[in-house]
Image (tube, rainbow, N blue to C red):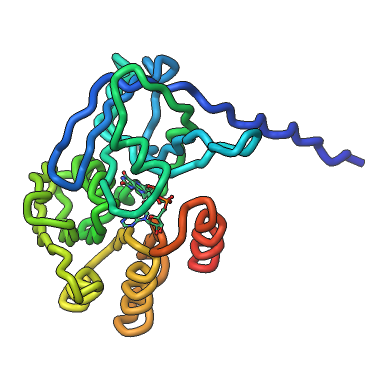
């Protein structure tokens, strides 16, 4: 009788050190920090775009604060990449760090990991929907689309000055939305106007309430199959990532 094979325990991921090489303001709401990760020189990161940056915890002995961000402009020859931090107005360890980041500063980082953001190869028509935190990911995803893809892109940014060119081999139809006081859901409203019939893939990332509303609209009101929708809550209003992390994963597990 064959014995069940013992599976080796997966090695615990080890964070790597990343060092700031440059800091610039791309537009009023975005600070771009260019990092170098010597361990990523010559690395094949595939389609992975998610990293977790670890920010020091002021409480002695406590775990660092992990914050997910998007790997942009990765250069395997130098191990350099950019992170575009949204300069939001709430107290957060990541935004506070980004506001005072200087060349030479170091952080620990997990990743890049995951490839769930990659567009399926057979997709012909995709829709990318995101708020300010998702714009970096939308930029990377758009840049990797095949030339035969048609992509509708809806992006909400804090101000007109945050609009930036998106380049892609695909045919992009981009609509920029600017958040107005008293209108908390421009993205969800704009999605309602989009045709759904021939869309192969919906990629949605924004604040939790917006993601829930968009997903429910697509599935329940428009009959879009759940398998065509990848909707990720990137943050939650009023709650920091230390608290929100587990809720995000529970939400995504329920959506599967
Ligand atoms: C896969 C993934 C990729 C991401 N990529 C990026 C990226 O490239 N760039 C980026 O800027 N963000 C990105 N985010 C979102 C980012 O991780 C969160 O915004 C995170 O909460 C910021 O950490 P913080 O320490 O500044 O704030 P936290 O300490 O987590 O939160 C403190 C307070 O700020 C509020 N808050 C957090 N973010 C925002 C915001 N954007 N606007 C308004 N209020 C906010 C919270 O609700 C809370 O009240 C990504 C998230 C995910 C899941």
Q: Residue at x 45, y 38 (%)?
A: 52
The foreground one among 22 and 119 is 22
Percent x, y of residue 241: 47, 52
Q: Vertically, is 146 above or below 14?
A: below
Residue at x-position 38% and y-position 62%: 231
How many circles with numbers are drawn on the protein? 0
In this image, 152 relative to 55: left or right?
A: left
Q: Residue at x 38, y 32 (%)?
A: 46
Q: Residue at x 17, y 58 (%)?
A: 153
Q: Quadrant of residue 220?
A: bottom left
The outermost residue toward the front is 59
In the foreground, 127 or 64: 64
Q: Is 186 placed above or below 64 here? A: below
224 or 247: which is nearer to us?
247
Q: Is residue 102 left or right of residue 57?
A: left
**Quadrant the N terminus occupies:** top right
**Percent coordinates x, y for residue 118 in the rendering:** 34, 46
Residue 169 visible in the shown view: no
Q: Evaluate whether residue 52 shows in this view.
A: yes
Residue 91 in the figure: left or right of residue 174:
right
Q: Looking at this rendering, what residue extends furthest in the right direction? A: 1
Residue 114 placed where, x, y %?
A: 45, 42
Where residue 51 appears, as percent x and y from the top left, is 42, 37
Image quadrant assignment for residue 176: bottom left
């Amino acid at each position: 009788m064959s014995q069940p094979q013992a599976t080796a325990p997966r090695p615990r991921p080890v964070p790597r050190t990343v060092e700031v090489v440059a800091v610039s303001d791309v537009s009023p709401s975005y600070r771009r920090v260019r990092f170098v990760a010597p361990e990523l020189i010559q690395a094949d990161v595939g389609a992975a775009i998610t990293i977790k940056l670890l920010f020091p915890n002021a409480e002695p002995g406590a775990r660092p604060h992990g914050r997910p961000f998007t790997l942009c402009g990765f250069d395997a020859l130098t191990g350099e990449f950019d992170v575009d931090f949204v300069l939001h107005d709430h107290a957060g360890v990541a935004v506070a760090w980004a506001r005072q980041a200087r060349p030479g500063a170091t952080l620990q980082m997990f990743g890049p990991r995951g490839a769930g953001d990659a567009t399926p190869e057979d997709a012909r028509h995709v829709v990318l929907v995101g708020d300010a935190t998702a714009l970096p990911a939308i930029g990377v995803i758009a840049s990797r689309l095949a030339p035969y893809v048609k992509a509708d892109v809806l992006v909400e940014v804090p101000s007109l000055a945050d609009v930036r060119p998106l380049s892609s081999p695909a045919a992009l139809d981009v609509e920029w939305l600017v958040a107005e006081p008293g209108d908390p859901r421009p993205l969800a409203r704009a999605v309602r106007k989009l045709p759904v019939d021939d869309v192969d893939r919906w990629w949605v990332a924004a604040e939790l309430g917006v993601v829930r509303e968009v997903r429910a609209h697509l599935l329940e009101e428009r009959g879009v199959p759940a398998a065509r929708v990848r909707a990720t809550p990137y943050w939650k209003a009023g709650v920091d990532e230390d608290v929100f992390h587990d809720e995000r994963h529970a939400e995504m597990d329920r959506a599967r």
